Amino acid sequence: MTDHHGSFVWYELMTSDTKAAEAFYKTVIGWDAADSGMPGVEYTLFSTNGTRVAGLMTVPAEAAAMGARPAWIGYIGCNDVDAVAAEIKKAGGRIMREPDDIPGIGRFAVAADPQGAVFCLFKGQGEPPEMPPMNTPGLIAWRELNAGDGATAFDFYAGLFGWRKGQAMDMGPAGVYQMYGKGDVDFGGIMTKMPEAPMPYWLYYINVADIEATHGRINANGGKVLHGPVEVPGGMWIVQGLDPQGAMFAVVGPKV
């Protein structure tokens, strides 16, 4: 069995208009979408060339009542959801939804780190399918935490999931961009958020084949570009934006 503890294993868009969000991501990213088939649950599965990438659902009523807005959320694999949830509480984080089972799928919990960034815990039943290479268009390739304080945020997640530090980049007034990962693979970065960001948040980067074409589709389909296209180390380009319902997302790819 592969050790998925500390790896991102799933992503989910919770939104106010699932049909409109489905249409946006199908057009902008090129994802396919299909109903999950789970009895009594409205849940859509996004996929690329047959590989399931993410889920889509309406923001739950109880979450909306607490002020939740459309947003992407990542699920981090763990060996024992209940034990990690207890560790989160001890480390100063919050459990926003206590551990619960998804019949036939696995066990999950919704958490917030001590600075307020939200993520999920997950332990699945059985071995998940093998994923294509990380740079495949349509896959989520990079997971970036804009933290209240990047250094202490890294310590929190490293303590839970065994993340190790990768390369650190000095971004001048923006501070240090600390890459992190497991084993010999970096799969994200942590930085202190910009002062104008109202609260800490996770941002997920989707691979695209052509950054300029994707940039144009975001603008043409009701999205809003917040930043980019901007070149990043490695010769790739990024765009950060909002979808039509207000969920923040990002794309990364080459200029063709």
Image: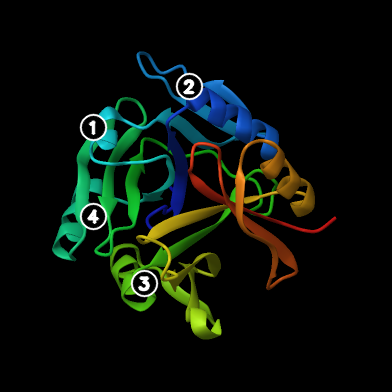
Determine which residue is flagged by label 4: 84
Q: CA distance from mark 3 to mark 2?
A: 34 Å
Determine which residue is flagged by label 3: 154
Please tell me how crowded label 4 is: few (under 14), some (14-19), or many (20+) other residues with Cα within 10 Å.
some
In front: label 4 or label 3 = 3
Quarter of the image with the C terminus is bottom right
Q: Earlier in the sequence, mark 3 or mark 2?
A: 2
Q: Earlier in the sequence, mark 2 or mark 1?
A: 2
Q: Quadrant of residue 15?
A: top left
Indicate the colouring scheme: rainbow
User: What secondary structure is marked by label 2?
Assistant: loop
User: What secondary structure is marked by label 1?
Assistant: helix
Q: Earlier in the sequence, mark 4 or mark 2?
A: 2
In front: label 1 or label 3 = 1
Please tell me how crowded label 1 is: few (under 14), some (14-19), or many (20+) other residues with Cα within 10 Å.
few
Residue type at tag 1: Glu
Residue found at x 16% / y 58%: 89
Determine which residue is flagged by label 1: 62
Q: Earlier in the sequence, mark 1 or mark 3?
A: 1
> Which of the pair 47/219 is nearer the observer?
219
Q: CA distance from mark 4 to mark 2?
A: 28 Å
Determine which residue is flagged by label 2: 36
In front: label 1 or label 4 = 1
**Above or below, comparing residue 50 to residue 35 in the picture:** below
